[in-house]
Structure formats: C-alpha cells, structure tokens
C-alpha cells in the first residue's frame, strides 16, 4: 500500500537517495535507478543489466540538535538560540565555545561515530552506506578520508559497495571506503 504523504524522515531520505544515485551514476559510469524506498536498507536499485545496488542512509550533524534546527524543530542555530546560549555563558552555566564546530574536531568525530554505529548492521551484499552531511558549511570530506578510515574499525564492515558521504548541497559525494 502506497502512502500519500511522506514523513519528514522519509522526505530527507528520498532527497538524499535521489541525489546520491544520480551522483553515483555520474562518478562510477553506472545506470542504477531506484526501485524501492523502504527500510533496511532504505533504497533498492537496479541497473540496466539487472545488477542490484542497495544503500542505507544516515545523517550527520556538526553539533547535537543541528538536524532538529535544520527541520525547524529547534531554535538551536537561530538568533534566539544564540541569545539563550550567551545568557547561559554570562550566568556561568555554559561554555562560550560549546557551539563552535571544528572540521578536524567534533565534525569528523561525529561522522566517525555515526558510521561506527552502522558498521554492525547486516543488509546483505551489494549494499552501501550513505551519510548525508547536514552542515550549513560545505566541508571538503576528501581532506579527512584517510583519518576517518584509520579511526573506523572496518573488521565488521558489511558495506561492500562502500561508505559514502554526500554533501548537504547534494552536489558532491566522497567515498570513505
């Protein structure tokens, strides 16, 4: 039974999946098309030769609550959130730098943690993991690939079609492994 309305999560997955498969096809010279958007894995695809390709989507964020802010469910990143934070700093209840993002610090570590949680999942062969970057900044993930690979325990990696990051603007993909 087809649903008339997608949930917020499904909308984000759909936009990510469509952009990823387009960029993957361009980069890899393939012709995959999405057959199904479901669960575990999120997408099932076939190419013109009926070769399967599946992928699961997860999101990463620079700071906790960034995804909620992006979806309009938190004022964490707007001016009111900043004012609240500064009031807490003045009261000594918050550190002034806790809302700061560093690509070589918390941003990369959050990505590593998100990937690590997914590495034990079992989706079967011909499956990739796609991590959607939700940052408002366009990080160049190619600069951190070697560090990320070394930080991951890939002994349990079942994503035989790779682990990928897709930029927030959905115009670039980066293969981690």
Image (tube, grey):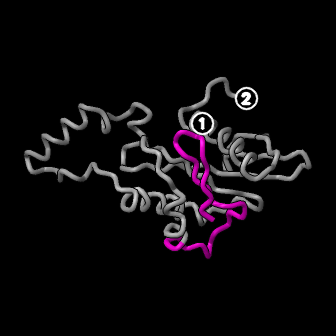
Q: Quadrant of residue 85?
A: top left
* Disc 2 packing (10 Å; few <14; some 14–19; many ≥20): few
Residues 163 and 141: in front is: 141
The residue under the point 82% across, 52% down is: 52
Residues 45 and 31: in front is: 31
Q: Give the mark count.
A: 2
The residue under the point 79% across, 50% down is: 29
**Residue 123: x, y in percent?**
70, 58
**Residue 72: x, y in percent?**
40, 30
Q: Per the image, is 153 magenta?
A: yes
**Residue 7: x, y in percent?**
56, 32
Which stretch did the figure color magenta?
150-177
Residue beneath disc 1: 10
Q: Quadrant of the C terminus?
A: bottom right
- C-alpha gap between disc 1 and disc 2: 13 Å
Residue that lies at the very extreme toward the bottom in this rendered image: 155
Residue beneath disc 2: 2
Residue that lies at the very extreme toward the top in this rendered image: 4
Q: Quadrant of the N terminus?
A: top right
The residue under the point 64% across, 37% down is: 14
The residue under the point 62% across, 59% down is: 175
Q: Per the image, is 65 magenta?
A: no
**Which is more foreground, mark 1 or mark 2?**
1
Q: Quadrant of residue 104?
A: bottom left
Residues 143 and 170: in front is: 143
Identify the secondary structure beneath mark 2: loop
Identify the secondary structure beneath mark 1: helix
**Residue 73: x, y in percent?**
38, 33
Mark positioned earlier in the residue sequence (1 or 2): 2
Question: Any mark on residue 166, and which?
Answer: none
């Amino acid at each position: 039974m087809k649903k008339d309305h997608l949930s917020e999560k499904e909308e984000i997955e759909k936009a990510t999946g469509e952009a990823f498969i387009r960029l993957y096809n361009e980069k890899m010279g393939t012709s995959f098309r999405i057959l199904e958007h479901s669960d575990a894995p999120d997408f099932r695809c076939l190419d013109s030769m009926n070769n399967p390709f599946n992928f699961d989507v997860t999101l990463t964020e620079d700071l906790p609550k960034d995804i909620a802010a992006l979806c309009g469910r938190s004022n964490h990143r707007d001016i009111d959130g900043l004012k609240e934070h500064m009031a807490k700093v003045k009261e000594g209840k918050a550190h002034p730098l806790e809302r700061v993002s560093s690509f070589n610090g918390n941003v990369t570590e959050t990505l590593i943690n998100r990937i690590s949680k997914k590495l034990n999942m079992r989706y079967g062969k011909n499956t990739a993991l796609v991590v959607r970057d939700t940052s408002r900044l366009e990080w160049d993930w190619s600069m951190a690939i070697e560090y990320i690979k070394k930080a991951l325990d890939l002994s349990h990696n079942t994503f035989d079609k790779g682990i990928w990051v897709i930029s927030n603007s959905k115009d670039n993909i980066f293969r981690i492994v």
